[in-house]
Image (tube, rainbow, N blue to C red):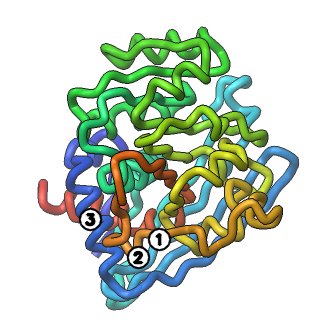
Amino acid sequence: MSPVVIPFEAGEANLSWTGLCDALIKGHALPKAEIADTLLYRGEDTLLNRSAWIDGMGLAVKCGTIFPGNPARGEPLIYGSVTLFDDTNGDLAAYIDFHLVTKWKTAGDSLLAAKRLARPDSKNILIVGAGTVGRTLWQAYSSAFPDAHFTLWNRTRANADKMVVECPGMTVEDDLETAVRAADIVTSATMSTDPFLKGEWFQHGQHIDLIGAYRPDMREADDEAMRRARIFVDSRDTTVEHIGELTKPIADGVISADDIIADFYDIDLFTRQSDDEITLFKNGGGAHLDLMTSRYVLDAWNDAQ
C-alpha cells in the first residue's frame, strides 16, 4: 500500500488542540520511546535530525534545517520533512508536512503543560515573540483559556503590530517587565541566547512556559527564574543535558537536576501545590513528541476519509 501524503491545510482541517493533548497523554502511557537526536552546526545554522520509536505506535524521522538568516532573504526559517513508519513491519505509513507536525507538536506540548499547571482562572496571557510560534500559541492557548486577554511583547514593535492585526483582541505592551508582572501565564518563543526574562519580575501564582531555547547556548529565563519556580519539562532526555535553559544553571549550581519535578512520562505529577506557587515548564521537544503528533495527524486523517 502506498504511504499517505498529508499536506498542511488539508491535514490541519481534521485537528483539534484537545484531541492532540489527549493523544500526547495516551502516547506517554505506552512504553518509553527510544529516541536519537543529531544536531550539526555551522555558526547560527543548524541541521536537526530527530528519530523515535514507540513500541505499539511506530517510528518517525523528522529532519529540519534552521537558518536564522533566511527570513532576511525572504525565505522560510525552517525547511524539513517528516516520515512515519508502521510499527508492525516498518513499512512507510505517511509523509506528513513538516510544518504541520512542528506547529501542532510545539504548541500542543506547551498547552498540555499549561492545562495541568496554570491556574484555571488565568485571564491574562503574555506571548513573548511575534514569530510563527507566537501566532500558534495564541491559537492553542485560546482553545483552553477562551476568556483570557492576550498581550504581546516583541523586540521589534513593527512585527508586533503585524501580529496583533492577525490576532483579534490582542494588545501590544512595549515594556517587558510591566507585561510579565501583569500576566497569569507567560509563554515565550524567541531565539535568544541571553536570558532576558527576569525571575525578580515573576508574581506568585504565575505559570511560565519557555519554548524558544533549543541549543546549549540558548536561554530565555535567568537564574533567579529557575530558583523561584517549581520546574517541569516535557522530556528529561531532550532538555536536562542539551538546552542552556537547564544546562547552565545546573552547571553553575543554581539548581540541580533533582529540582525538576517531572516530565510527561510522570504526567500525574503535573499539578499545582497551591495557587501562589510559580510553575515553570521547559518545552524542549523531542522526536517522540513528533511521532505522537504525527500519529495523531494520520489517525485524524484516516477518520475523516
Q: Secondary structure at mark 2?
A: helix
Q: Where is residue 229 drawn, in percent x and y?
A: 55, 52
The amino acid beneath tag 1 is: Ala
Q: Where is residue 241 drawn, in percent x and y?
A: 71, 70
Q: Where is residue 265 drawn, in percent x and y?
A: 40, 76
Can residue 181 be seen by looking at this rendering?
Answer: yes
Q: Secondary structure at mark 1?
A: loop
Closer-to-camera residue (169/89): 169
The disc label shown at residue 262, or none: 1
Question: Is mark 1 in CB contact (under 8 Å) with mark 3?
Answer: no
Q: Count neighbours of disc 2 (C-alpha within 10 A) and say few if under 14, some if 14 to 19, many if 20 or more.
A: some
Judging by the rendered image, the residue that carries numbered circle 3 is 23
Res 140 → quadrant = top left
Q: Count neighbours of disc 3 (C-alpha within 10 A) and say few if under 14, some if 14 to 19, many if 20 or more.
A: some
The amino acid beneath tag 3 is: Ala
The disc label shown at residue 265, or none: 2
